[in-house]
Image (spheres, grey):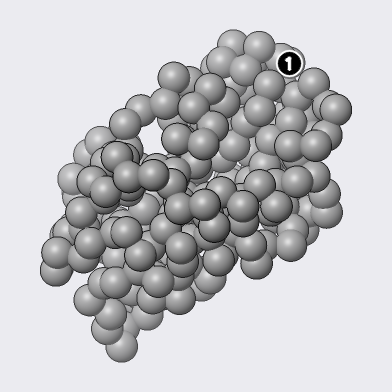
Amino acid sequence: MLITIIGRGHSGTRSISHTLSASNVFMGEPLNGSGDLLPPEKMYEACRVMAHYVEYKGGLEWDFSKLHTMEIDPLFKRLIEEYLSSVLNSPAENKGWKIPETTLVYPWIVRMFPDIKYIHWVRDPRDCILGGHLTDDLNDFGIQYDKTDDIRRNRAISWKYQREIVKATPAPKNQIFIRFEDMVFKQDETLAKLSEYLGIPMAKIEMRPDSVGRYKTDTGVHMYDFFKEEMDICGYDYN
């Protein structure tokens, strides 16, 4: 079984990566403290290759349609296969990988690996954008957007973009959607869902309740109107 995690940076994906490792799923090597497969440079370059085929329409709109019909760029395939070499070549029965930038190339990952198990991981965007992440500026990965001098807004647009690219991608055969907050406050129930989905027992790791709702003591801007539709879909209350 091959597994990957789809979720923006600072969405709490390290918790599911650590959970999978503790559940005897080989997550590649080497890993950093966040459970990301290293080195990341070939994944980053793969993001830039795919971004050439995303058409920016202005505002908060992108056209991803080419990605679903065109031949996948051979350079992209080579970069991904090289990045994942420790996973793909492993004899482990259960294996996978996690790095937030996988979300930026989700359409072509689904086409390359249509039969694997996808874990979609989301977190309240108001918490997700409080800290800096490498994907804050989409331009760094070749993605066009209306960049501003406001880093919080850029982070918010990055969150929105990653939601849009996932929604625009035809659903793979196997997927499950998990909220970070449910892993924190309903861990037993969440692990039971994951165990049923993956068909393996899931280990329990320590989760920190204080990692939820941090935006409530934040003095900066952490809510944007374009969050609302996605927050409704994900079940987050913004009133």
Q: Position of residue 229 (x, y in %)?
A: 18, 45
Q: Choose between 111 and 223: the one closer to the eye.
A: 111
- Picture quadrant where residue 88 is located: top right
Q: Left or right? Give the position of 12 relative to 156.
A: right
Farthest bottom residue in view: 149
Q: Position of residue 180 (x, y in %)?
A: 51, 40
Q: Residue drawn at (49%, 41%), measured in percent from left and top?
A: 109
- Picture quadrant where residue 233 is located: top left
Q: Position of residue 215 (x, y in %)?
A: 41, 62
Residue type at mark 1: give it. Answer: Pro
Q: How many marks?
A: 1
Q: Choose between 148 and 166: the one closer to the eye.
A: 166
Q: Residue drawn at (42%, 26%), measured in percent from left and top?
A: 172
Residue 231 lies, with reference to residue 44, above or below; the image says above
The residue under label 1 is 201
Residue 191 visible from this viewpoint: yes
Q: Left or right? Give the position of 112 relative to 142.
A: right
Q: Position of residue 110 (x, y in %)?
A: 46, 35
Residue 140 lies, with reference to residue 78, above or below; the image says below
- Picture quadrant where residue 188 is located: top right
Residue 213 visible from this viewpoint: no
Q: Residue drawn at (32%, 45%), measured in percent from left and top?
A: 70
Q: Left or right? Give the position of 92 relative to 184.
A: right
Q: Please tell me whether mark 1 sits on a helix, a strand or a loop.
A: loop
Q: Choose between 142 and 79: the one closer to the eye.
A: 79
Q: Choose between 215 and 201: the one closer to the eye.
A: 201
